[in-house]
Amino acid sequence: MAALRFISALIECAAAVYILHRFQVKDALRVNALLGLVGPLILIFVTLVGVVGIADKLSFGRLGLILLAVLLIFAATR
């Protein structure tokens, strides 16, 4: 999980450097749009890794609650 978060941070930092280097609003908007896609994907992957890691210790009801929580996070941020 930490490795995925580290990769996400590297992508964000690389995008910031690219935006500073190009210094054009059009390019910055494109990069920002891509980052808007990458962020939720990283969240899904990290959550999936965490749930798989503890799946044998949780009941189906609790796994359902975790899934519901993730769906509510996405619904609230739309």
Image: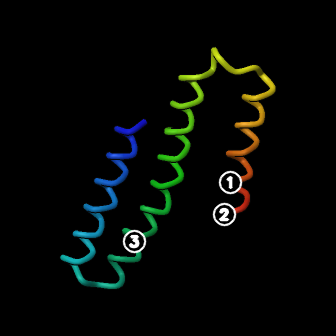
Q: Name the residue under label 3.
A: 30
Q: Mark 2 points at which residue?
A: 77
Residue located 28% across and 84% down the image? 24
Mark 1 or 3: in front is: 1
The amino acid at mark 2 is Thr
Question: Which quadrant would residue 73 be assigned to in this image?
Answer: bottom right
Identity of the residue furthest to the front in this view? 57
Q: Quadrant of the N terminus?
A: top left
Q: How far apart are marks 1 and 3 (CA)?
A: 24 Å
Does residue 78 sit above or below 66 in this rendering?
below
Query: Which one is in front, 50 or 25?
Result: 50
Residue located 33% across and 46% down the image? 6
Q: Quadrant of the C terminus?
A: bottom right
Mark 2 or 3: in front is: 2
The amino acid at mark 1 is Ile
User: Which x, y percent locates residue 50?
Assistant: 54, 31
User: Which x, y percent locates residue 38?
Assistant: 45, 54
Q: How many labels does the image show?
A: 3
User: Which x, y percent locates residue 9?
Assistant: 34, 54
Dot placed on the residue nearer the N-terminal end, 1 or 3: 3
Looking at the image, do the residues carrying marks 1 and 2 touch, with CB atoms under 8 Å apart? Answer: yes
Residue located 37% across and 50% down the image? 8
